[in-house]
Amino acid sequence: MAKTNPPAWWMERRMRYSWDGKENRPLGAGWVSFTLVKIPYRPSRAVVICDAAVSGQPFDPVAQASLAMLCVYLGSHLEWLTLFRELEQEQARLLAMFDGLELVVYVVDPDTYEVIYCNPYLRRLLGSDPQGKICYREFQNRDEPCDFCTTPWIKANPGKTLRWEFFNPKCKRHFLIFDRLIPWPDGRDVRFEVAVDITREKKLEEQRLMAQAYEHAMEARSHALSQIAHELRSPMNVLLGTVQASLRGIYGELTEPQRKAMDRILQSGRVLSGLIDELLQMGREVVGEVVLEKRPVPVAVLVNSVLPLAEAELGVRRDTIQVSMPDEISGLLVDVDQRRIQQILINLLVNASRHSPGTGIELRVSRLRRSALAEIERNLGSEADEWLVISLTDRGRGLSPRECEAIFHGIRLSGPKDTPGPLHLGIGLPLSRKIAVWHGGWLWAESPGPGKGSTFHLALPLGGGREEAGHDE
């Protein structure tokens, strides 16, 4: 059967066209065969070979014209098909990239609100696949379009990106959102949205603002307390001066009971005077004027010097305070401002007596390695490897886990209404922790729970020195 070659211009163009099948069409007196042939070095492309065959007769003019028209049609059609497939491949690569992103990506038809595409991250977040469904139902649990929908804005501002923040009540998360109108492969303009989960950042920002507000409140409180302390100092000096003059016999001889009573007044007045000094020091701390008078002090001297003051302050016998201090620790030296550490321990003893009246108080002294303080290590201001830990345990009302930290932020705990004891200003523990921090240490509380007592721990860095033999404090 004779063959007639296609026109030369078709032979020149045929390598540009792609086809995926085989088709025979009748043309005049013969047949024209269009056959798919794959190109070996480009398997994604193919060419069409046109063979014309008639029953031994050449094409008549009508057949030749028809063949030419058919070639033009096929050329245009196949070129469009190639471009469309390349576009589909580009879209598939783009969506594959979106599928791998750990942020929200979705596409919505701005007219019908149909979700055209959403990535796996969004599907995991929602717990369902919203693709092909209505966006405001799937994303917001609404029955009608959202009143805050940004579609009108992006339609009115083509080519511009809208940046905004939103809290989604369905998944309870905060998002930073970027919206834009983009062309989709099918020719329509769609709403393209990328949303970054900023829930953690929002929480951190809220905590920062709360901490900032707390710091401002504490500064105002410190200044107020400092002013109060200035007003209290003058009458306190008069009181202490009068008691000291009485003890020296300036106002006449005192009986032994009167002298003991004056001694107790003097000791309590000195404790109160120390508290006034701490109030003043808190005000100085706000403006960075804290000065510690640190020196090496034997542990035994530090602890034992508190007991007479506690006896005068608490009005109880010293033997109700059980002290446990190993001999190998008592001679160790700790570099502290002794008066300030005494103030911490007195505050703790005052609180223990107030909240557990009539029961014993246990004071334990121990030496611990830094590794044993892992739970509070982040709060330690010193890099010391050995630490002196003074623990005071009472059998009082106990504390909840929240209260164990809240009490160091000025939240006062109410004791039993019939609890005897000295006036408690509710500021001892915040001040005590500040003093511990100034020394590079930490003060914290532990409790098995309400009604089961509490233990307060004071950790101070040890320098490694020891009291010399025959040292007289």
Image (spheres, helix red, strand yellow):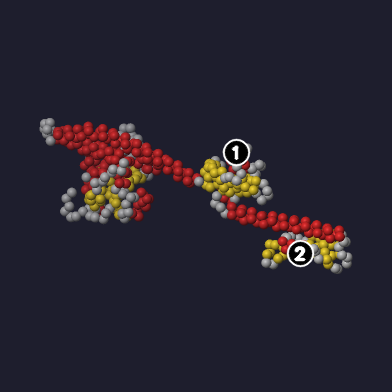
Camera-side residue: 334 or 140?
140
Residue 421 placement, left or right of 184 = left
Mark closer to the chain start, 1 or 2 = 2
* Residue ranking furthest to the top: 251
Which residue does the image show at 70% across and 57% down from the upper left? 82
What residue is shown with label 1? 146
Q: In this view, does 262 lie above or below 193?
A: above
Which residue does the image show at 72% across and 65% down from the upper left? 38
Which residue does the image show at 24% across and 46% down from the upper left? 293
Residue 122 point in image, percent of width and height: 58, 48
The reply to whether residue 384 is visible in this rendering is: yes
Residue 126 point in image, percent of width and height: 58, 46
What residue is shown with label 2? 11
Q: How far apart are marks 1 and 2 (CA)?
A: 58 Å
Query: Circle 1 — which element?
Result: loop
Which residue does the image show at 21% across and 54% down from the upper left? 467
How many other residues sit within 10 Å of disc 1, few (<14), some (14-19) or many (≥20)?
few
What residue type is disc 1 on?
Cys
Query: Which quadrant, please, contains the N terminus?
Result: bottom right
- The number of callouts visible is 2
Query: Circle 2 — which element?
Result: helix
Camera-side residue: 14 or 270?
14
Residue 292 point in image, percent of width and height: 26, 46
